[in-house]
Image (spheres, grey):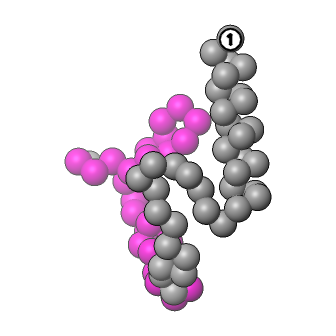
Amino acid sequence: MFIEYVDLTYQNFIKQIKNSNKCDIPGLTLIEEFTTIEQEKEILQQINSINSWIPVQDRIVVCMIC
């Protein structure tokens, strides 16, 4: 029953995003074009240059105390 609820909630959320530029999630604000393409490239470059990424289950995370 819980899985069905989560799936329905997720599907409704996806429909809401596809059908509107506005999303009714309390506390969420979308600011389009907040960063420039150059800023995005710089941010990604800095993230990718971090040497302390470690695998955790099915993802990788950065170790901030390493």
Dot 1 falls on a residue whose secondary structure is loop
Q: Residue at x 75, y 57 (%)?
A: 18
Q: Residue at x 23, y 48 (%)?
A: 65
Could you say which is closer to the camera, residue 35 or residue 23? 23
Give the magenta-colored segment's residue range.
37-65
Residue type for callout 1: Met
- Residue 15: x and y in percent read 76, 48
Left or right: 14 in relation to 25: right
Could you say which is closer to the camera, residue 37 or residue 6? 6
Quarter that holds the N terminus: top right
Residue for badge 1? 1
Q: Quadrant of residue 4?
A: top right
Tell me, yes or no, if residue 45 can be seen here: no
Q: Quadrant of residue 2?
A: top right
- Residue 3: x and y in percent read 67, 19
Q: Is residue 40 magenta?
A: yes
- Residue 27: x and y in percent read 41, 53
Label tally:
1
Q: Is residue 60 magenta?
A: yes
Could you say which is closer to the camera, residue 60 or residue 51? 60
Rendered view: 28 above or below 39: above
Could you say which is closer to the camera, residue 57 or residue 6? 6
- Residue 38: x and y in percent read 51, 88
Q: Residue at x 49, y 40 (%)?
A: 55
Q: Residue at x 54, y 81 (%)?
A: 33
Rendered view: 1 above or below 6: above
Rendered view: 9 above or below 66: above
